[in-house]
Amino acid sequence: MGSFLRRLKDHFNPREPISPGLYLSLSFAGLALVMMVWSLLTYGGFISPLFLPSPGNVLNAGWEQFLKFGFTNDILMSTYRVMAGFLIAAILGVPLGLLMGTFKAVEAFVEPLIGFIRYMPASAFIPLFILWLGIGDVEKIAIIFVGSFFQLVLMVAVVATGVPKEMIETAYTLGAKRIQVIRKVLLPASLPGILDTLRIIVGWAWTYIIVAELVAAESGIGYMIINAQRMLQTGSIIFGILVIGVLGIITDYAFKWLHRWLFPWVET
């Protein structure tokens, strides 16, 4: 018993690694605990199915969405909108964030505006975007973009600012020019942090899909969830939310894999 307690205590040392097997076991245990509580509350009759359907009812509702209502197309449309908005935000936001983190003059010029707009909720722009862009995919992609871009710029700027000043001074001492310092020192040193930032931001982008598809949508997971809410189809609502979570996890692990592949020397 004492040996077991010592091993258990060792697993709670700050930032100490644990074995891959234990990590996987604990991950499954956390999911299993949620499923057990959910099943107990629903199959045990403690909560009305109108408010929380059982896991089986949620799966049946999801199966019906695929068979009768073409839910595969909704998934593809939502994925396209999220990825399009996120990629546009990344293409524009990463260079701007690097410039902000590298040059104080750019930071002084841009940061007050970026910092001001980032506090505005993306949903507040829906009426304007409908007026300016119509009710098609462009408006929905714009919502994803607004929800991602301004946070991305500031986070990339923080990453660039975190590059040790000693590395820059050493490069100048060795005779590097300004553009060489940026290309050979600042950019490579920032890339791991930038990729981590993109992983976080793509998760945020997924959270905006419901907002983006809230108004005047004819397809998408958000459109399905809103329709299910009108018909009091709680199982379909929960299934749609779970699908968004699964898609988010897939993109998250894709970025983690890419990070390990590109930067195997970086501690995660």
Image (cartoon, rainbow, N blue to C red):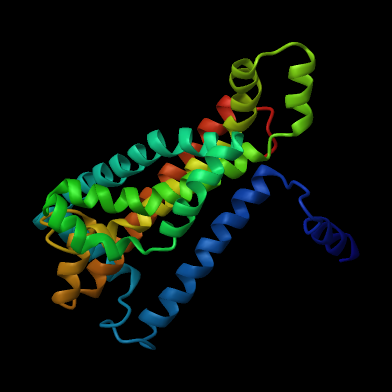
* Residue 249 visible in the displayed image: no
Q: Residue 198: give x, y in percent of width and height.
A: 48, 41
In this view, 180 is above or below 186: above
Q: Residue at x 30, y 68 (%)?
A: 238
In this view, 247 is above or below 61: above
* Residue 103 visible in the displayed image: yes
The answer to whether residue 102 is left or right of residue 134 is: right
Is residue 234 or residue 195 the one in the foreground? 195
The answer to whether residue 141 is left or right of residue 67 is: right
Quadrant in the picture for the C terminus:
top right
Q: Residue at x 68, y 40 (%)?
A: 162
Q: Residue 181: give x, y in percent of width and height.
A: 65, 20
Q: Residue at x 15, y 50 (%)?
A: 133
The answer to whether residue 88 is left or right of residue 226 is: right
Is residue 177 or residue 153 the one in the foreground? 177
Q: Residue furthest right?
A: 2
In this view, 35 is above or below 155: below
Q: Residue 69: give x, y in percent of width and height.
A: 10, 56
In this view, 83 is above or below 174: below
Is residue 117 or residue 36 the one in the foreground? 117
Q: Residue 216: give x, y in percent of width and height.
A: 12, 61
The answer to whether residue 261 is left or right of residue 88 is: right
Quadrant in the picture for the N terminus:
bottom right
Q: Residue at x 81, y 56 (%)?
A: 13
Is residue 198 or residue 97 the one in the foreground? 97
